[in-house]
Image (spheres, rainbow, N blue to C red):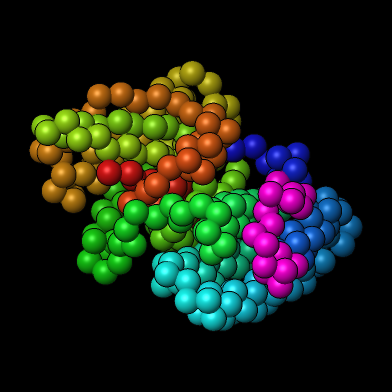
Amino acid sequence: MEQGADMSKEAEWDKRFNIGVDSIDKAHRKLFSIVHRLITLSKDKTNGQWACAEGIKYFKNYAIQHFADEEAYMRSIGYSGYEMHKRLHDDMRDKTLPALEKDLTESDYSEESIHHFIGICVGWLTAHIIIEDRAIAGMISNKWKTDHTGADMEALENALSGTIHEIFRLPTQLVSEHYSGENFGKSMIIRLTYLSIDHEEVQIFMALEESLVLRAVSSILNIPLNKMDQLVMAIGKELAIQIAGQVAIRSDLALQYHLVNSHFMTAEQFRQAFYAGNFDYSLLFNTGRGYFAFVVSI
């Protein structure tokens, strides 16, 4: 997941984002305008940090107000997908934005944390508008098969948190329960395909920020590493397979499915898979040393 040029490109307004509801389209254009300004400010080595801090507060406040306005519109037209759509807003407002703000504060608005904020917000806006908001206008259907909440989601979150802690020796903070393929930095992306005894297919996508992979492999080999070479990629891939396996064991799925294929994906392939697919679970975590996404399609 490259940053920089890609992030600027995503932040540009594109007419395909219009859903045909003037008030919503205007708000979306405003949000993209704020993000574009943040990208420019993030490159300012003199006053960029302070300006970004103020800009991020403005973005958050504007986004939260937009969520409320959009929800009011959905209620006014009796939109059938309102409850799921509102949960996506709630997840962004109550989990993702606070987690990103925590990262910003603890790092004193470091360049890396600002890039995380911009990347995740740009990616979230892009996917949310193209898929969820266009569904309001009946242009497409929304992407979520089932909105898993309660015990199922908690069990998966605990399984992932425990596994990540054991393998990487790092704490985890849940950033989103409805991750939508947002850019959170250069990452190693892996797609795992499993089959059940009844030949039902399960796809698991994992995106691990390179800094997290390098730290893990460096620790395993007891060698300082700063480059994602073939050795690091090979070990990282096996770690991803082991993570999925441990999560399956903790979720009582280990005896039902077996791995039949695993391969790396580019950021663009991952993005396209996200826009085209429908997912049962899609979680994003921050370990403090890098972000980690875990996506399941059953």
Q: Is residue 19 visible?
A: yes
The structure residue drawn at horizontal position 43% and vertical position 42%, both measured from the top left corner, is 277
Query: Going by the image, does 269 lie left or right of 197?
Result: right
Q: Is residue 266 left or right of residue 24?
A: left
* Residue 289 coordinates in the image, percent (x, y): 51, 49
Could you tell me which residue is drawn at 55 percent across and 54 percent down? 139
Residue most extreme to the top: 230
- Indicate whether residue 19 is drawn in magenta: yes
Percent coordinates x, y for residue 117 in the rendering: 64, 58
Q: Is residue 23 left or right of residue 193?
A: right
Q: Name the residue nearer the viewer: 145 or 168.
A: 145
Task: Answer left or right for 68 relative to 94.
Answer: right
Q: Give the overall secondary structure of the magenta segment.
A: helix
Classify the position of the N terminus by image quarter.
top right
The location of residue 220, given as percent across then percent down, is: 38, 32
User: Splitting the image into 4 quarters, where does residue 173 fall?
Assistant: bottom left
How many numbered discs sit on the rendered protein? 0
Residue 3 percent across, percent down from the top left: 68, 41
Residues in magenta, as a range: 10-27
Which quadrant would residue 171 be assigned to in this image? bottom left
Indicate whether residue 33 is drawn in magenta: no
